[in-house]
Amino acid sequence: NALARAIGRFAQSDGDHNTANPALTLHRRSAITEPLHCIYKLGLGVVAQGDKQVLLGNETIGFGPGQSMLTTIDLPVVSHVTRASAREPFLGMMLTLDVRSVVQIASEMDVPRPRRDYAYRAISFEVLDGALLDALVRLVSLLDELTLVPRLAPLIQQEIIVRLLTGPHGPQLLHLVTSG
């Protein structure tokens, strides 16, 4: 998996790794973790290798490779890594989204609004499509070229927002825009 390889190049030890792109953090765990209370902010989370579990209220949601998680509001959750080993560590990433950018891009696009009866959720899990995966791999791989990060990362992040708005996460993200 290209995304797992890219994350693994920069997250070589266990922990949460800040990057040259302030909106992007990379995560690595070599063992299953205990449940941890945390707050997920507006952003896109992706597991590239291993598995994770998110507890939201009374609901338990499994989350693994090939899936993306979008949170649209600050959301208290309990999460933990459920599959990881030294040989095959958990590798993930979190891209914090800028609400102003989302609103601006959505206003410039002709994206259909969600139906009134659409069941909005503050957190959604969807299959990661190839075009979005490609943009995420390019964003992480850009860390190899630190001088280009300030110029190119914002462009790739705009592409990611466009793909989120027009993809399966679109109704969730549009709810954020339309509800203010």
Image (cartoon, rainbow, N blue to C red):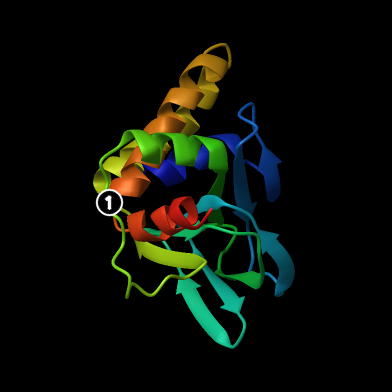
Q: Residue at x 52, y 67 (%)?
A: 122
Disc tally is 1
Image vertical order of residue 103 relative to residue 62, above or below: above
Name the residue nearer the viewer: 120 or 75: 120
Residue at numbered disc 1: 129
In the displayed structure, 3 sits above or below 34; it is above
Q: Residue at x 64, y 70 (%)?
A: 79
- In the drawing, does residue 5 fall left or right of residue 14? left
Q: Which x, y percent locates residue 106?
A: 38, 41
* Amino acid type shown at disc 1: Asp
96 relative to 143, above or below: below
Residue 135 is situated, as x and y percent measured from the top left of the image, at 36, 35
Residue 51 in view in this figure: yes
Instruction: From the viewer's side, name the closer residue of 119 and 148.
Output: 119
Along the line of sight, the residue nearer the viewer: 108 or 16: 108
In this view, the residue in front, 41 or 37, is 41
When asked about the image quadrant of residue 131, the answer is top left
The x, y position of residue 55, in whole percent, is: 60, 78
Q: Residue furthest top?
A: 147
